[in-house]
Image (tube, grey):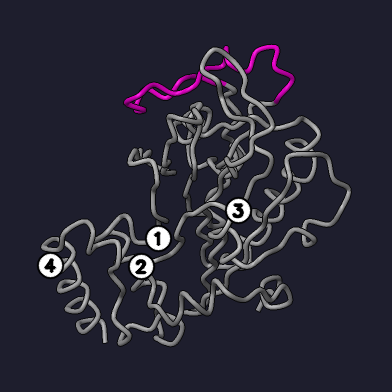
């Protein structure tokens, strides 16, 4: 079985290497590797990621993707923030000896220059993380890079320190009983509240997270859309199908998955299945 998987992945790699970018965007993994049924699916997926680092990334409408060691950004110069940030969580993400660095600064890898902390000064908004600092506890480098402004978006304090923080905490908890969780998160940039700072940073009205969890060769998915405001509601109130996030953002998520699997994961929402520890 292992040799068959390696051979299949080798041909996938050759095909990706020889296919135009437009065709790569439509690439699907062959049904013979149906990752909800094949034993050891997580190993197949991890190997695919090594061959094709964009395997689980959504489409980018900005044409500026920045890959940091532990998270990847699609940066929107127009809005001076990411349209999405993608990262992976496992129970190994968390090292209690790694403390927050709080070194908010421009991201030197943004070719058009990112927003800066000065844009937020006196604005009344928090510099809210997209990939949470807590999830970047791999090492001091990962923690520090999470404070790049490419990973920051203007959030109301009552939102950032309230229900958004609660959702982040839940995702950390869910990672403890899954093999891994792939997260794509970002702002909904249409119809913003306002713009702040010299760089006219867009203040989003809402934020989203899409989650793809793997355990024992099975996949499950869920998404959340939350308004940028205080809320005392349960986080589950804001659960939506991934299709809904695609509708409001214009971004295509998980397009490299098998078409049947993708459609099934993105169209449905089953909170009972999602929160199950089995």
Residue 261 lies left or right of residue 135; in this view the side is left
Assess whether mark 3 and mark 4 are in contact (beta carbons under 8 angstroms): no
User: Residue 246 bears which disc, if any?
Assistant: none
Label 2 residue SS:
loop
Can you identify the residue that label 4 sits on? 14
Distance between the alpha carbons at the discs numbered 4 and 3: 32 Å
Q: Mark 1 points at which residue?
A: 56
Residue 171, given in percent of the width and then of the height, sits at: 65, 55
Name the residue located 20 percent from the left edge and 82 percent from the top edge: 3
> In this orientation, which residue lies closer to the viewer: 42 or 158?
158
Q: Is mark 3 on a helix, strand or loop?
A: strand
Q: In which quarter of the image is the N terminus?
A: bottom left
Check the image and report above or below for 95 versus 249: above
Can you say whether 222 is above or below 91 in the image? below
Measured in 3D between alpha carbons, the distance from the residue under mark 1 to the one under mark 2, in whole angstroms, is 7 Å
Q: Residue at x 72, y 44 (%)?
A: 164
Query: What main secondary structure does the magenta stretch of the protein show?
Result: loop
Q: Which numbered disc flags the more N-terminal residue, 4 or 2?
A: 4
Image coords of residue 211 (percent x, y): 57, 61
| Residue 119 belongs to the span the image colors magenta | yes
Do the numbered discs 1 and 2 sit on residues whose CB atoms are within 8 Å?
yes
Residue 69: where, in percent of width, then height?
A: 37, 41
Residue under pointer 2:
256
Q: Which of marks 4 and 3 is nearer the N terminus?
A: 4
* Marks 1 and 2, the one that precedes in the sequence: 1
2 or 3: tag closer to the N-terminus:
3
Q: Is residue 73 magenta?
A: no
Give, as a single range, the part of the protein colored magenta.
103-125
Distance Cα–Cα, label 2 vs label 3 = 19 Å
Q: In which quarter of the image is residue 96?
A: top right
Q: According to the image, label 3 marks what residue?
A: 209
């Amino acid at each position: 079985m292992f040799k068959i998987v390696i051979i299949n992945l080798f041909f996938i790699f050759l095909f990706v290497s020889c296919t135009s970018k437009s065709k790569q965007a439509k690439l699907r993994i062959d049904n013979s590797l149906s990752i909800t049924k094949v034993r050891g699916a997580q190993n197949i997926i991890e190997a695919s990621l090594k061959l094709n680092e964009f395997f689980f990334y959504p489409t980018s409408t900005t044409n500026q993707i920045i890959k940091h060691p532990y998270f990847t950004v699609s940066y929107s110069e127009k809005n001076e923030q990411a349209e999405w940030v993608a990262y992976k969580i496992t129970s190994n993400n968390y090292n209690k000896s790694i403390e927050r660095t709080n070194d908010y600064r421009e991201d030197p890898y943004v070719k058009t220059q990112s927003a800066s902390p000065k844009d937020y000064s006196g604005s009344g908004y928090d510099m809210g993380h997209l990939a949470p600092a807590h999830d970047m506890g791999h090492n001091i480098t990962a923690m520090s890079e999470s404070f790049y402004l490419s990973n920051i978006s203007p959030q109301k304090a009552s939102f950032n320190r309230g229900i958004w923080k609660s959702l982040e905490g839940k995702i950390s908890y869910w990672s403890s009983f899954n093999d891994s969780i792939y997260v794509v998160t970002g702002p909904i940039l249409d119809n913003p509240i306002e713009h702040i700072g010299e760089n006219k940073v867009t203040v989003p009205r809402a934020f989203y997270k899409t989650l793809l969890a793997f355990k024992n060769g099975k996949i499950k998915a869920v998404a959340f859309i939350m308004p940028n405001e205080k809320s005392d509601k349960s986080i589950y109130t804001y659960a939506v199908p991934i299709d809904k996030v695609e509708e409001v953002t214009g971004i295509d998520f998980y397009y490299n998955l098998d078409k049947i699997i993708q459609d099934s994961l993105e169209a449905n929402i089953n909170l009972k299945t999602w929160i199950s520890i089995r």
